Amino acid sequence: MSPKVGVAPLRREQIVRATIRCLARDGYSGLTLKKVAREARVSQGILHYYFADKRAILVAALAAVTADLDRRVAAAQARGGPDPRRRLAALCAACLGLAARERELWIVFVEFWGEMMHDRRLREINAALYARMRRQLGAPIAQGIRAGTFRRVDVAEAAAVVLALVDGVSLQLTFDPKAFGVATAVRFCEDALTRYLEKEAP
């Protein structure tokens, strides 16, 4: 039996959030549709109405955490104003803060990466996600180059460098929080990006 009209989007969100909690607790290898149904407090029949299999529900979890990250980054950048340096700093702070406060979101990325190594379709999804993120990162970099704030660099390559930096430090905050605090991590990223992007003094 299909869900009632109006209930479907909320029920799907409920299932996806339950999946994220299960992934954070048990990993993808320990994920079963039965566990997800129990966590979401729905029947397995309802679960199968929304998702065909484990891969489909993993992709939905990735989309959810990516959307969460996008919203937080956009809000942080809006608060930072139009200055490209502040926009990049806001992005770093939003990602690193999220890694420290909501560890389960970054765990979803890690579980997805582990599975995509053996699944061509998942690799394609991840490649498209990374391409989109590099385009988003490239916008403030290109803006800074036009404004004379940043030195002239290949925007796509610079965006890949920024993404690698934020990814790597976020993962350390997620899995080794004693290595450094969020404030230290943000300062480290800002210092690294300043050295990499800003023009040398004449």
Image (spheres, rainbow, N blue to C red):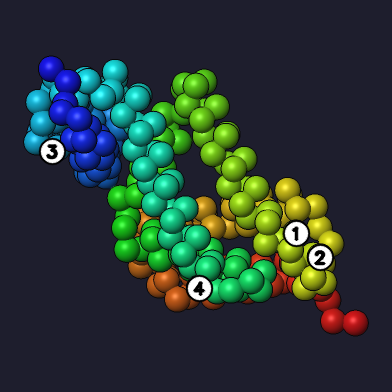
Q: Residue at x 29, y 18 (%)?
A: 52
Residue receiving disc 4: 79
Amino acid type indicated by mark 2:
Arg
Disc nearer the start of the sequence (4/1): 4
Amino acid type indicated by mark 3:
Glu
Disc number for residue 146: 2
Disc nearer the start of the sequence (3/2): 3
- Crowding at dot 4, Cα within 10 Å, few <14 / some 14-19 / many 20+, comes out as few
Nearest the eye: 12 or 32: 12
How far apart are the alpha carbons under marks 4 and 2?
Answer: 22 Å
Residue receiving disc 1: 142
Residue 15 can be seen, yes or no: no
Q: Indicate which label's residue lies in the foreground, 3 or 4.
A: 4
The reply to whether dot 3 and dot 1 touch (C-beta < 8 Å) is no
The reply to whether dot 1 and dot 2 touch (C-beta < 8 Å) is yes
Q: Residue at x 32, y 63 (%)?
A: 101
User: In which image quadrant can residue 14 be found?
Assistant: top left
- The residue most toward the right is 202
Nearest the eye: 143 or 54: 143
- The residue most toward the front is 5
Residue receiving disc 3: 39
Asked which secondary structure carries label 2, the reply is helix
How far apart are the alpha carbons under marks 3 and 4?
Answer: 36 Å
Disc number for residue 23: none
How far apart are the alpha carbons under marks 3 and 2?
Answer: 50 Å
Q: Measuring from the top left, give residue 55's x and y in whole percent.
A: 35, 24
Q: Measuring from the top left, give residue 16's x and y in whole percent.
A: 27, 38
